[in-house]
Image (cartoon, coloured by chain):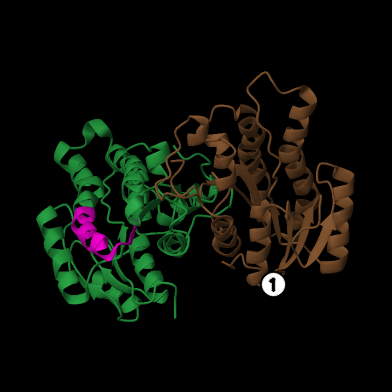
Amino acid sequence: MVARSPEIKVAVVVGAAGAVGAAVVERLRADGFTVAGLDVEAAAGDRQFVVDATDRGALTAVVEEVRRELGLVSVLVVAPRERDVAPIGEMVRSRWQTLLHAHLGATTNACAAVVPAMVGAGAGTVVIMSSWLALAGIPGEAYQAAATGTLLSFTKGFAMEVAPAGVRVNCVAVGPTASELEQGAGPAGGSRVDLPLGRCATPEEVADTVAFLVKDGDFYVGQVFEPSAGAVV
Amino acid sequence: MGTLDGVITLVTGAAQGIGKAAAVRLAADGARVVVNARVDDERLAASVAGTGHNAMPAPCDISDWEASQAMVEKVQDELGPIEVLVANAARMTMKPFLEQAPEEWWQQVDVNLTGHLGVISAVLPGMRKLGRGRIVIVSSYWGVIGWENATGYGCTKSGLIALTRSLGRELAPEGIYVSAVAPGVIDTPQLEVDARDAGLPLKAMHAIYAKGIPAGRIGRADEVATTISFLATQAAAAYVGQTLHPNGGEIRCSM
């Protein structure tokens, strides 16, 4: 069995300007990858592309450019970071659509743009970032939970679709992050979130999981990883 | 040399399969490995050899708590406190529930669940003295989805997932991280038991299992050992009470 770690070491990180995305970029670069960082603003990465990932045409064009410049992409990480909080019933449709498309739209667009070439190459690693909020049940976070929750089942279904071609798709449920708790999710918002370590997991620790999946994750397919430092079990 | 340089590491059930692979991997990571198995035989000696003769054999039947206590004390007298425990030992006898003698059924629980509680209790004082520790519990995907003719084994393995959750919460504030791995079908001697149960040659059993796995193949013990190494080292702090599922996509739920 050939190890996953390919000679092709080109990665695309969507959402590279966020804390998690930036940590993933740094970690992959440290592991020898050339990384294209995509986001709506200047991001981390060897090559940076400003693009709205919810626009499939624009994203596909950027991915084509990445391929021309850097070659075949072996790793795709999608780390959407749109955040919106409202009690249920108090988010107008357009606001909800923005939240949903930032997560599900950007993720499906990125997969559609990057993965067919991976399938053609017979190898590739995809890591999709969802959220602990999709698993935990926190008051006031129902919209965020729904938007990020779609990625859990998208991961599973898409993973089944491309696994026979040698592409491994898995998900990381990120958080809670310190900033989410500060903004009111969890204890401050009146609901119980245990922090057995007395702290949240860091973006670097999320990046550790991505690095593990890239290097040694060949037998993981359609799984959800929860590096939550015990806040969600 | 490695990420676990000099870390005293006990692997139970290390005479074969995943336990043996974990011992080999953790030794390669630099750990000072102690290999446990029920009996001191040529298989345990082969595990010691597999680590480059760098492991200390510590045979005992972990279903006997006093024996586990004595084993751990002997190891700690010789090497010092155990910092990493890989709780892997397991017993499986496949039979329809109503046809299995209660003694045989409960023997699985005595090892796979009760036995680990004894070993964990024995190593905890040492970890507390160190102020840190990592416990990686080896469950199984049969603990998540169950399996016919494996009621005893299956319920111990789901028990371990639940144990991991609670123990993870309980011990994390002390710097002792508990997590688990629930492998799917892995190429280990245990598959011979399944093949026998199904009345099939081993090769046919492999093919049948691979058919149900999206990755198109069964897993290897060294792949599970890689996950154990991951949980025992850098990512340990982010995974508290969690179970990872290397199973080639055969199941995509976590219980």
Q: Is residue A103 left or right of residue B226?
A: right
The hue of chain B in the figure is green
Quadrant assignment, res A35 = bottom right
B145 within the magenta span:
no
Furthest-top residue in this view: A89
Look at label 1 and name its amino acid: Glu
Q: Find the magenta span and give its range.
A: B119-135
Q: Quadrant of the N terminus of chain B?
A: bottom left
**Observer able to see residue A182:** yes
Quadrant assignment, res A209 = bottom right
**Circle 1 Cα neighbour tier, 10 Å, few/some/many (<14 / 14–19 / ≥20):** few
Residue B214: give x, y in percent of width and height: 59, 47
Q: Residue at x 63, y 65 (%)?
A: A27
A4 up-or-down from B173: above or below:
below
Q: Is residue B253 left or right of residue B130?
A: right
Q: Nearer the viewer, residue B250 or A55?
A: A55
B14 up-or-down from B242: above or below:
below
Q: Nearer the viewer, residue B88 or B233?
A: B233
Image mark count? 1
Q: Which residue is mark 1?
A: A7
Q: Is residue B9 left or right of residue A194?
A: left
B121 within the magenta span:
yes
